[in-house]
Image (cartoon, helix red, strand yellow):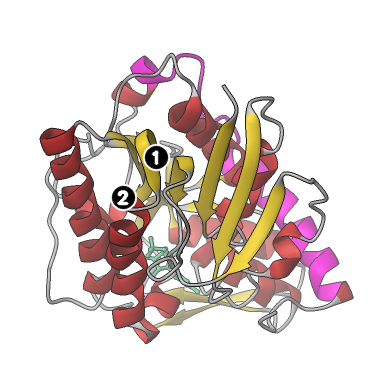
Amino acid sequence: MPRSVLVTGGCGFIGSHLVDRLLRRDDLERLVVVDNLWTGLRDNIAHVADPRFSLRIADAETFTAGRDFDEIIHLASPASPVWYMREPARTIRANIGGALNLLSLLKPGGRFCFASTSEVYGDPHVSPQPESYRGFVDCTGPRASYDESKRCTEALLFEEQRISGLDIRVVRLFNTYGPRTRIDDGRAVSNFISQALTTGILTVYGDGSQSRSWGYVDDIVDGLERFFWRDSVSHQGPLNIGNNREVSVLEIAKFVSSLAPGSRIEHHAPAPQDPSNRCPDLTLARQVLPGWEARTGYEEGIQRTFEWFRRQIATDGRSAAS
Ligand code: UDP
């Protein structure tokens, strides 16, 4: 059956990779990307030349259209702490306001897919974190605009599913890195790489013993593709998607530094309420998405990302908003 699909945040880092995969679908009739270019970049989709594709520059929370879409994939949101802490109200509007608005554009019987986050687990007291873990979060803390808007949007979607049988797919993404991240994104991998290639000083917040599980974007988007639109999947989520190899921030910084001779690490003040650890329990993902695995180790993924950043910096420096 031909499908009409709407993706918010399709000019973003993860969104643009998902757009590439959507365009390989035979059943895709129309793909509308809605993006306000707050953190997304036109460059990320500049290569797309497909008559089924169109871009609308608009906010997810106010975009208007008919009740036309078979599938809506809501990705629009900053994901870097630097960006969402700068504009918390806008972050909340993008997530919650976006979901509320977009629900009205879904055809009856349509599917609503949402990218939630491992941030719903806060600073976890359980490791690895299964989907059943309810998290250790602070609704008045500095990360709350992001964490709580993702949590509230999950609440909205699961209530709609319970009350009206809405077909939903809710994924919780763990730290993701790779090509098409903004140079001024501010997250660990992209910061370390762009610092290694420019100033030569890699800024580690605190002692660097805090850990994350670093997922290469191709692996993560492969998981999203399988979960969001394979009809054999009936599970609605929440579903953890990430790489479950947990590695300290310092180890990542040292690795990046080893790729740029002459660069060095500098320790800065710890980030406020920085989670000490994060690692997905992938038991459910392996059941629901047989064959899927985040296979790319950070060594390989970071080298690929490093080369991509090197080319970007050499050509245009992607820090300017498009
Ligand atoms: N981090 C760091 N230096 C940077 C950017 C981030 O040491 O330049 C640390 C940050 O404090 C956190 C980890 O790297 O412990 C991951 O941060 P990121 O912003 O990538 O994602 P988060 O998981 O915090 O949302």
Q: Is residue 236 above or below residue 314?
A: above
Specify whether tag 2 is near ligand 1 (CB below 8 Å): yes
Q: Position of residue 292 (x, y in %)?
A: 50, 22
**Is residue 177 rendered to the left or right of residue 135?**
right
**Is residue 51 rendered to the left or right of residue 15?**
right
Which stretch did the figure color magenta?
286-314
Q: For the point 61% across and 65% down, which residue is it?
A: 56
Looking at the image, the residue that sits furthest to the right is 315
Name the residue nearer the viewer: 235 or 271.
235
Q: Position of residue 78 (x, y in %)?
A: 44, 68
Q: In the rendered structure, which disc, 1 or 2, sits on the residue that comes first in sequence?
A: 1
Q: For the point 33% across and 19% down, which residue is it?
A: 234
Residue highlighted by disc 2? 118
**Residue type, mark 1 in image:** Lys
Q: Is residue 219 above or below residue 143?
A: above
Q: Is residue 20 above or below residue 183?
A: above
Q: Is residue 187 above or below residue 238?
A: below
**Residue type, mark 2 in image:** Ser
**Is residue 230 rendered to the left or right of residue 236?**
right
Q: Is residue 300 magenta?
A: yes
